Image: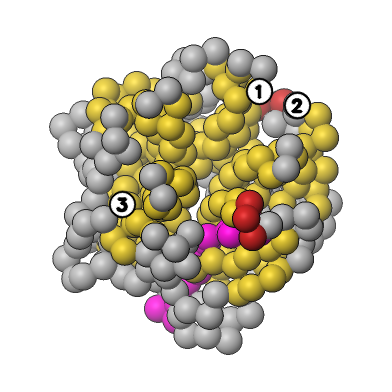
Amino acid sequence: MLWEKKGLIYRPSGNENWSKTHAQVPTPFFIEAENIIRVFYATRNCDNKSLISFIDVDADDPLKIIFINPEPLLMLGKTGTFDDSGVMPSWATAHEGFLYLYYIGWNVRNTVPYHNSVGLAVSNDKGRSFKRFSEGPLWDRDYKEPYFSASTCVIKENNIWKVWYLSCTEYSEINGKTEPRYHIKYAESEDGINWDRGGHVAIDYKSENEAGIVKATVFKENGRYIMLFSYRNFDNYRTDINNSYKIGYAESSDGINWHRKDEESGIVPGASGWDSEMLCYPHTIVVKEKLLLFYNGNGFGQSGFGYAEAVKF
């Protein structure tokens, strides 16, 4: 693939207590009737906890911001629930007149830094407001996956709901920190709510030092499934560009079994500026026959999010 970077779209001003830093995990949804792309994102409040909001951008020029939502869409869950310490968007999909927003719920732990689960919020007004589907997650750890699950890519195809999601496989002590290791698995559903997780690994680690494979985004081209994702190493990935997040690439004939070709992702960090140190949390969307890629740069979204347009794929 080959991408033409278009630039930075949005970074919070930091003037609001509920939105001090970050515009993380951009999750776009094209609203054709209004000619806008509604981009959900996670921002961090004055307590460094993530909340979800959105901006609207011009579908013909996504660098042009039309509207900035002035408040959070989804507040923290009730104390003791799976999302009482943070919420982050992951995937938005239309279904029977509703908009399903799959999201990540955060808990703080004593023995490890955090625990994630997969939640669902539902909108009847194209994403201007949401209600939780339930106070509990769609799924959490179980006997097959004993650590946690998070970021999802959800596609409905031939009446089958398909998901590619983050699955944590272990924690390790690295340079005095407890660090999670995770890759991408695949599951299916008949209704988008009850998921049959068989534990099938879609994108696995390619080395002993690779530690974070996250945020799959899948589309089809000429009968092939194409996936972009971000990946990082264990060591110093927060500060060392060589170990930090990059965008990977994979192909599949069935969406289940994948062949990694990271060198074909077609996008690399910039020479300077907001995405010069890392590229992470990619999300592709087709808008008016153009394939667009929304993504985060430096600081896991602290520098905001931008987009690129495919010029070859």
Is residue 45 on the magenta stretch? Answer: yes
Mark 1 vs 3, N-terminal side: 3
Mark 1 vs 2, N-terminal side: 1
Q: Which residue is mark 2?
A: 313
276, 129: nearer the viewer: 129
Q: Position of residue 46 (x, y in %)?
A: 45, 81
Q: Which residue is mark 3?
A: 119
Neighbour class for label 2 at 10 Å: few (<14), some, many (≥20)? few
Name the residue at the top extreme.
Answer: 253
Q: Secondary structure at mark 3?
A: strand
Mark 2 vs 3, N-terminal side: 3
Is residue 126 on the magenta stretch? Answer: no
Q: Is residue 46 above or below residue 58?
A: below
Name the kind of residue labelled 1 in the image.
Answer: Glu
Neighbour class for label 1 at 10 Å: few (<14), some, many (≥20)? few
Q: Is residue 276 left or right of residue 112?
A: right
Residue at 40% x, 44% y is 95
Q: Which mark is residue 294?
A: none
Q: Position of residue 25 (x, y in %)?
A: 53, 54
The magenta region covers 36-47
54, 78: nearer the viewer: 54
> Where the N terminus falls, by quadrant?
top right
Name the kind of residue labelled 3 in the image.
Answer: Gly
Residue at 72% x, 55% y is 59
Q: CA distance from mark 2 to mark 3?
A: 33 Å
Q: Secondary structure at mark 1?
A: strand
Q: Secondary structure at mark 2?
A: loop
Find out whether the residues at labels 1 and 2 contact each other: C-beta distance under 8 Å: yes
Q: CA distance from mark 1 to mark 3?
A: 29 Å
Q: Position of residue 5 (x, y in %)?
A: 80, 48
